[in-house]
Image: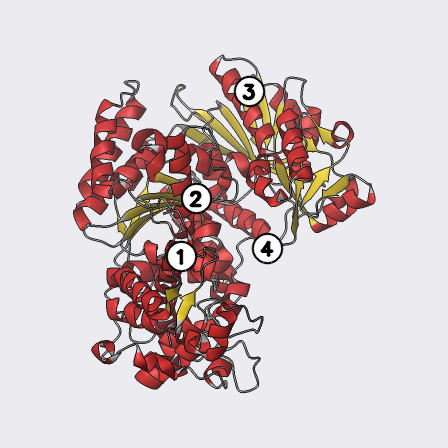
Amino acid sequence: MKYYAHSSENAEKSWQTIVEHLENTAKIAGEYASEFNAEEFGYICGMLHDLGKYSLKFQQKLQGSILSVDHSTAGAQEIVNLYGDKIGKLLAYCIAGHHSGLPNYGTAASTEGTLYARLNKGIEEYSEYKNEINLTSVKALRSLPVRPFDENNYHGFTLSFFIRMLYSCLVDADFIDTESYMSDILKPRGNTATVYQLNSVFNEFLSNFVGEKTKINSKRRDILERCLNMAKMANGLYTLTVPTGGGKTYSSLAFALNHATVNNLKRIIYVIPYTSIIEQNARVFKDALGDKNVLEHHSNYQFDNKDSEDIQVVNEKLKLASENWDIPIVVTTNVQFFESLFSNRSSKCRKIHNMAKSVIIFDEAQMLPIEYLKPCLLAVSELVKNYGSTAVLCTATQPSINELLPPSVKPIEIMDNPKQLYNDFKKVKVDKKGEMDDDTLAEELNEHNQVLCIVSTRKHAKEIFNRLKDDALHLSTLMCPVHRQETLAEIRQRLKNKQPCKVVSTQLIEAGVDVDFPVVYRSIAGIDSIVQSAGRCNREGRILTGNVFVFKPVSEYAKIKGYLERTAKVAEMVFRKYDDPISLDAIDYYFKMLYDIEGEQALDKKSVLDCFEEKYKQLEFDFQTAAEKFKLIESNTYSIVIPYNEAARKLLNEAQFSPYPRSVARKLQSYTISVYENEYKTLLKNAALTTVNDSYIILDNVKKNYDESTGLIMPKDTYGEAIFS
């Protein structure tokens, strides 16, 4: 009797046998795992993952039976039989979860989804595999190729991370082979340039790139040269402390490409805190390296649907690459990167084996979420220590993380003298103004021809804007992305033409938005935020000294609570201690005080690490629980589509009459804003919302409910202190 893994609706196509699928998957998984010296572990997972398909019940299912069949448990049980309660149990997590997700270990009282329950479950007979598969040649597995950070700490995290990486190899290999069989047309994966080739392209691009001959540009070239020299060093954890406006986008990419070439690494992963600044960085990379070599992977990205055959092929490749990051340059968000690393779902975990042997650049590293800082830093340390990667923490405000890192993973600073660099780029003076009410603030802002005011809540931004002269502009996330882009274009045009330009914004303008004001006002906030605000002032050094004024708002709309309130209080301590509150010494003091005040427990607020450390000696890990806990964006928000212009209305019409309305979702992201639950309920109560096909929530009566300057009009009673950006 022949045993099959996959059937085909195409009558002329032969069904895929189990042995063929297992051998293909094993070979691919082994190849993936070889990148971290675990080829035989990946291979054996691939060979055993679908043993349950040898059951009579599964073969009947392929013939049309509607019976439910568990085909993953057999391989998990068999691998424990073959390799015992240590290595066998580690690999069993991968096989048991290759469809349903990495499980919790569980107990005797657990539900059937846990690994404990699966290993003790009665299952269909599958022993026929022994007539087709000879495991003697692969039975011997050496000791694990990973080592814990030190003798006393985080052994469980290291072991669980190894399981996670193997799992990624297995599920990606399984997807790839299944796709290869199921698809009648070969999907256009791969065939992109190598990192070595892209390094040559980028070096040529830089040699042809001529900026204005200014003192600032001369310093930027010095930074670039230092990055190129340091790129020759070995894999490790690096910091790149470059002042705002120091050209770190080009310099960090130059370091990454040269470093990858020297150390034979496979790809560059650029991790950015906000989707709002990904697009401009990705555009820089695409212009220099070509669209087909750069993947943007974030919620707002739309793959181009132009008619050109070449463009269609490129975009099909990019869509496929978004599944597993098999491409030389990836630009993604903190959310996508870290939630993938801590997810237990196969679709999210597929990509993480491709984080091995990569250069990973964390842009604006101070934006790593403090409540998950410890697990995030441990994950980065694992990639560096055990998976051959290099990580670069890239920022103007380097967080004081040395004490949070394992002893064997300590960062090397790429710049030889960051303090001198800070002085070279010092283009602003930061002064504290004390308390200011909204009327006094508006009066001062109106005296300036060009001025930017940044505050911490959306309501406060709107209140100040309403007090300014008619030529003022406003930015907040109550405006849909297209609206914000139009406003930013108007701001840049006015600044360039030296026209009046008074802008009130929430902190969305702080990170990576390239604007240059002579004067900036900032409501009291963390020092890292104040540094980012200062980066929007005298950015190009066109005046001798730009002025940044930090004030304490006296307004019912400016109240902040929780973590943001604590960062503001620590910032006030910095102002009392340092004449220059944004110097490198002041920044170091700020982060040390902040981490001390928050306490070690706050750096892993949801106790994610406990899921891997509490019972690691028994190899009992809770992958599902960790994934549920690790959510960088809490889900108590609702997405509302704004029919902002004719293009948005056409897309909504398409969604309304489409049998697959979610296929329009990515295109509509540019017209979507997020609101909190209390805001959503009030808008519903006011009959301001409509739902289309149970898929989209749409704002009704745009003229009434959406202001052309400030965006969504919210009922006053829904503004809570937690509404930021």
Report the residue marked by disc 2. Answer: 319
Single out the residue that lies furthest toward the right: 686
Report the residue marked by disc 1. Answer: 13
- Whether pointer 4 and pointer 3 mark residues with C-beta atoms closer than 8 Å, the reply is no
Position of 504 relative to 90 (above/below): above
Query: Would residue 295 be found to the left or right of residue 132 on screen?
Result: right
Q: Which mark is residue 65?
A: none
Q: Of helix, strand and loop, which one carries label 1?
A: loop
Q: Of helix, strand and loop, which one carries label 3?
A: helix
Say which amino acid is labelled 3: Glu
Determine crowd level at label 1: few under 14, some 14-19, many 20+ residues with C-alpha closer than 10 A.
few
Report the residue marked by disc 4. Answer: 634
Residue 551 in sight: no
Residue 519 image offset from top left, x and y in percent: 51, 25
Q: Of helix, strand and loop, which one carries label 2?
A: helix
Report the residue marked by disc 3. Answer: 490
Between tags 4 and 1, which lies in front? 1
Q: Mark 4 or mark 1, which has the lower sequence index?
A: 1
Q: How far apart are the alpha carbons under marks 2 and 3? A: 33 Å
Q: How far apart are the alpha carbons under marks 2 and 4? A: 26 Å
